[in-house]
Amino acid sequence: MERLKEHFRTKIDPAVKEIKDFISEYGDEVIGEVKVSQVYGGMRGITALITETSKLDPNEGIRFRGYSIPELQEKLPAYPGGEQPLPEGIFYLMLFNELPDDDVVRRVSNNWARRATIPPHVFKVIDALPFHAHPMTQFVTGIMALRTESEFQRAYRAGISKSDYWEPIYEDVMNLIARLPRLAAYIYRRTYHNGDHIEPDSKLDWAGNFAHMLGFDNEEFRELLRLYMTIHVDHEGGNVSAHTVHLVGSALSDPYLAFAAGMNGLAGPLHGLANQEVIRWIFAMRDELGGGLPSKEQIANYVKKTLNDGKVVPGFGHAVLRKTDPRYTAQREFALKHMPHDDLFQIVSRIYEVVPEILQSTGKVKNPWPNVDAHSGQLLMHYGLTHYDFYTVLFGVSRALGTLASLLWDRALGFPIERPGSTTTELLKERFAK
Ligand code: CMX
């Protein structure tokens, strides 16, 4: 058994025991109440999931196994000569609850590089789609085509015992993560570069190689992609993509099925698709105003028009966060360091100065501050990744690391099929009329 897998195996029994003991001691304790308004309101504020990999605080933002983004930028290994954390490191931290050193991160990198080959039929399936199929459609289709490789599906058919589920799930999780950059790069080059594909460079790290296969061999862009792939990994368990992967996986659907389902959720404009919507919205504003750097007043008028038209301002607001998203801040710092005079960065900064006050003045938006998607497109645009319909695929590749690390733990811990109850308005009315 490979070292990483063996290491994971040693973690399972103590974790199972810890949770069993905890439930037997505190299983009847109450951790919250559920109001009628929450049941109608998208279950906001109800804690009903266990997700060990990360936790979101409304004011502080995300922490991965207890570490904030600035802490991880300091503590996680970087590429030689680089500054940004390597996504291999945050994956290791989320999975093992241990900070990795350079050696460990290299081992994860090499492990994924060994697993990265995609069978030819996957490319044929993608090639059967029209070029105008949205990149997220192509991405999910590719993941589903890759399902022929699922070790869990094979093992289950052969009659695997419950206690061994984690082993083929581990293989599927590692294989899928390893293959996603190649899949995503294939879609990008097929759709926007006449199918002029670029072979992987297995000497590079996972994100560096991804940048290379996309066609960006500039070291600064690689650093951006390492940061991007690190900050988008996970946002605790209740967001649509993470929750979907967990939910679908709970039916013992293998990681390919579960992750594809999560990606269908990420492709919604209120979730991951917001990163492309931000750029579309900014460009539409710029076009309407005739180009250049819009004034604060012009931006304010455009925001008000967006709201009056019954639309959302993409990149702003959040179901849990109540302050500026630290993932936004990390990207803003990258921009301040590498491209402070970039035109689009000037616009993004100005939007940040104008939007919160207007959203606040509506009296209904609970969080007027920018989220991760308000900034990511600007950074990609700067380096020439201008096809914004592709942006959610990048988000998705990163989101695999957190959701699949969680899924592996779900199976290792033997979590049951998810099945909350539902009720009807009539029943609720009867209950409270009494
Ligand atoms: N622009 C306009 N209206 C907004 C808004 C925004 N950015 N954010 C919230 N609102 C509105 C809601 O639509 C809702 O209106 P109604 O009462 O008329 O239905 C009201 O304010 C209250 O919503 P909320 O409780 O503040 O926010 P929710 O938890 O319901 O929704 C989110 C959260 C992210 C879907 C919402 O803020 C939004 O639509 N933002 C814009 C899209 C976006 O950036 N999504 C990306 C989020 C991060 C990610 O997952 O990638």
Image (spheres, rainbow, N blue to C red):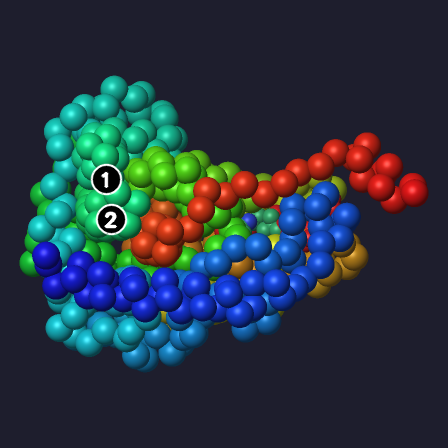
Residue 298 in view in this figure = no
Task: Residue 268: give x, y in percent of width and height.
Answer: 50, 39
Mark 1 neighbour density, 10 Å: few (under 14) some (14–19) many (20 or more): some
Query: For the residue with label 2, is its CB less than 8 Å from the closest atom of ligand 1?
Result: no
Spatial CA distance of label 1 from label 2 is 7 Å
Quadrant containing the C terminus in the rendered view: top right
Task: Residue 344: give x, y in percent of width and height.
Answer: 45, 56
Q: Is residue 196 left or right of residue 297?
A: left
Q: Is residue 413 left or right of residue 104?
A: right
Mark 2 neighbour density, 10 Å: few (under 14) some (14–19) many (20 or more): few
Quadrant containing the N terminus in the rendered view: bottom left
Q: Is residue 235 left or right of residue 219?
A: right
Task: Residue 136: give x, y in percent of width and height.
Answer: 38, 35
| Residue at disc 1, secondary structure | loop
| Residue at disc 2, secondary structure | helix
Q: Which amino acid is tagged 1?
A: Ile
Where does label 1 land, which residue? 160
Residue 361 in view in this figure = yes
Q: Is residue 365 left or right of residue 313?
A: right
The answer to whether marks 1 and 2 mark residues whose Cβ atoms lie closer than 8 Å is yes
Where does label 2 land, which residue? 164
Task: Residue 398: give x, y in percent of width and height.
Answer: 33, 53
Q: Residue at x 71, y 54 (%)?
A: 34
Q: Which amino acid is tagged 2?
A: Asp
Q: Residue at x 37, y 51 (%)?
A: 414
Which one is nearer the viewer's eye here, 43 or 422? 422
